[in-house]
Amino acid sequence: QPPSWSTPKGAEMTSFTPLLLAFTLPPLRLRPHLASSRLARLTMADEHGVATDSTKRSGFRFSSGGASSDGLGDSKPSSPYLPISEGYLDGDKPDAAWALAATNFVKQGRTILSQIGETVGLLPGDPLRPPACLGLSLSNEAVKEAERRREAAGGSVDAHPVSRTLYDVGCLLLDNLFDQRPIQRFWFLEIIARIPYFSYVSMLHLYESFGWWRGPELRKVHNAEEWNELHHLLIMEALGGNAQWSDRFLGYHVAFAYYWFLLGVYLCSPRIAYQFMELLEAHAVDTYSTFVKENRERLSQLPPPAVARSYYTEGDLYYFDDFQVDRKPGSRRPACDSLLDVFENIAIDEGEHVKTMRACQDYAVLGKVVVSPHAVNSDTSSATSDEERRALWKQWAEEVNQLGGAAGPWVSFGAESSEEWPLK
């Protein structure tokens, strides 16, 4: 059912309003979470059944758990955030490019009029729809100050002058386009943050296809990094970061141009391509850390989206471990009990990306191999000659034989025997 549109106080319905409603109601049926206020008006008790003062003031009450309206969580009480299942799949099935483009044009185009209507006051906005109802803020000056402190403490990135110029221009645009719109800014950052890993993997496939160079472990790490950024993106979509057509239009087109730009950079210098990404990831650390500092109390009162719980605490965490090349698998298992935990986790994730980008630069310059944390480094990896490998092989065989003699009726390694290995 479409929402009941009411005239804001002090405004009157104009002759244009029915026309706008006629164009905007179809997308409400197609993507109800973009325009319906019902989900945002869910009144739910928190885990103790009592709303906090801040949630009472906003008119939005949350539960610390949430059923997965996005299809990625469990069957806990309903989540107050926006469902992301449609955004996750963006269609029913793979199809021809022109069919997907036409469908997307209709789907996206219909929301243009609704945004224009709300902007000029012909249609009522919904103050209780995320992210407006969340009451979060971010100071551009505070982010700049955090960056200055990091660089003064020795955390600056020794970037190419062209890379630094492009980075500074990008930060200036972000500050002006997303001033006091932190969730929309984060969504834009995350839609961009995935692109370098697409570009890197594309170039690695190209190198391997030509027989120039093969780096399967590096591709594996980049795939895990993209998977991490994807879930950051899904979290921001659950918080309403992509609700406006103009933000989506800008994000998708910048991402498209950025992909081809990075292909050219990587083709000429993988080191500079990784270096540029280190700049962006370091900025992301500054931005998320500042956001957490400014909104700590508010974030601690809000529950995590179901997609965040799914990624950080549930199911197979293999990919979560795989992009953190400086950590042992399973050594990081963060809490995800509030929106504060979610954004702290994202800030730490971005710091791990910075480390990985530095490691990739060392790989490109010094040949220091970047491998997945799950990679099994055998004892023969440091052997440089056949004699050393043969000695290690004999040592291993003797250890196995000794273990078999002490543990029971194991077959002697290398012995000719028809006995089967014991079951225990």
Image (spheres, rainbow, N blue to C red):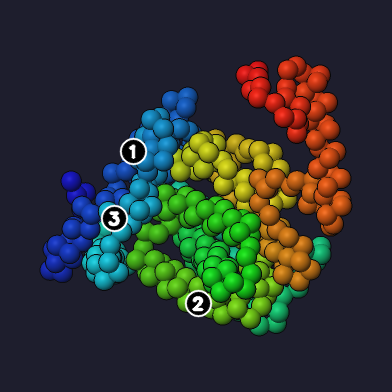
Q: Secondary structure at mark 2?
A: helix
Frontmost residue, 88 versus 239: 88
Residue at 58% from the left image edge and 43% from the top image edge: 318
| Residue type, mark 1 in image | Leu
Q: Is residue 189 above or below residue 83?
A: below
Q: Is residue 131 left or right of residue 324?
A: left
Q: Secondary structure at mark 1?
A: loop
Residue at 57% from the left image edge and 53% from the top image edge: 224
Residue at 66% from the left image edge and 73% from the top image edge: 270
Mark 3 neighbour density, 10 Å: few (under 14) some (14–19) many (20 or more): few
Q: CA distance from mark 3 to mark 2?
A: 26 Å
Q: Which residue is mark 1?
A: 42
Q: Is residue 186 left or right of residue 156?
A: left
Q: Which residue is mark 2?
A: 260
Label 2 with label 1: CB-CB less than 8 Å: no
Q: Secondary structure at mark 3?
A: loop
Q: Which residue is mark 3?
A: 93
Q: Quadrant of the C terminus?
A: top right
Whether residue 421 is visible, yes or no, is: no
Q: Residue furthest bottom?
A: 162
Q: Position of residue 307 (x, y in %)?
A: 46, 43
Viewer-nearest of labels 2 and 1? 2
Label 3 with label 1: CB-CB less than 8 Å: no
Q: Earlier in the sequence, mark 3 or mark 1?
A: 1
